[in-house]
Amino acid sequence: MTAQATAQRVQTPADLILLDIEGTVSPLAYVHTKMFPYARARMGDFLVSNLSRTEVAAALTQVATDATGTGLVLPPPSAANLPVIIAHLNELMDHDIKATGLKQLQGLIWEGGFRSGELRADLFPDVAPALRAWHAAGVELQVYSSGSNHAQKLFFAHTVDGDLTPLLAGHHDTTVGPKKAAASYAAIAAASGRAPEAILFLSDIVAELDAARAAGLRTALALRPDNPPAPAHDHPVFSSLLELTP
């Protein structure tokens, strides 16, 4: 099936729906033209001012660990070494690399924006009504995104439709594993105590859905405005969460 094909009807499982964020519940444009530039513009000043914070130090340690996995050795975090580290972070952002340490730092910067009101998470209009209906029907809702767990919680706490965090039972980021690896979804299923086939994963990325299905999860592809065309696939599709029946 291609992205343009008629959607199969997706029956929502009684147990758990696992949600992607970017391109699934929130427009790509909001994330790419508002949130990413916000973090990038403040990254240097934020690190200079917050280098001694425990959570910043931990994120920078993760940045170095991420870099080591690609064969790059970064200098230890210090005021003198910040220009090298910031240049590396800018390169990651240039190429939209979903590196765990970078995502942790972005989340810490977004915290200030969400708390000040400069950022307000944009959602597709069907999202809040669907989440509330599923929650009321007893469906457990969790999130799996490349954004850090901290950033996810901030995002859903400060949406255009209010604080939606009471509807969400769990958050997963790339500390559980890459989103295109079946083992990540197996780990999420195990942590939830659910059988994989009782979990429905919703995403706009076919490779993520392929990985989830390989782990035994049910899947459906988000066809949202301005999402890139999907490659050939055989996942059920939807254009609104309200199409998915609880």
Image (spheres, rainbow, N blue to C red):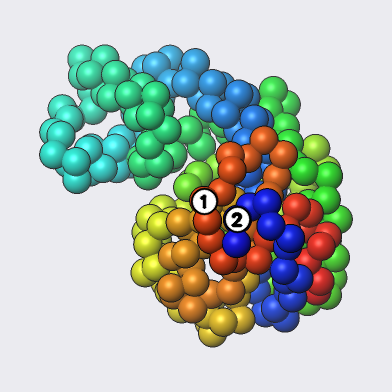
Question: Residue 9 placed where, x, y %?
Answer: 76, 71
Q: Residue at x 63, y 40 (%)?
A: 227
What's the residue type where badge 1 is placed?
Answer: Pro
Residue 83 shows in the view: yes
Determine the image quadrant of residue 241: bottom right
Q: Is label 2 in a helix, a strand or a loop? A: loop
Q: Does residue 4 sit above or below 185 in this rendering?
A: above
Q: Where's the C terminus, which quadrant?
A: bottom right
Disc 2 crowd, CA 10 A, few/some/many (<14, 14-19, 20+): some
Q: Does residue 191 sit above or below 106 in this rendering?
A: below
237 lies left or right of 203: right
Q: Residue at x 26, y 15 (%)?
A: 83
Do callouts 1 and 2 mark residues in contact (Cβ within 8 Å)? yes
Question: Residue 190 placed where, x, y %?
Answer: 46, 78
Q: Name the mark on residue 2.
A: 2
Q: Is label 1 in a helix, a strand or a loop? A: loop
Q: Residue at x 39, y 16 (%)?
A: 44
Question: Mark 1 = which residue?
Answer: 231
Q: Does residue 245 sit above or below 50 in this rendering?
A: below
Which residue is farthest bottom?
195
Question: Residue 204 placed where, x, y %?
Answer: 59, 51
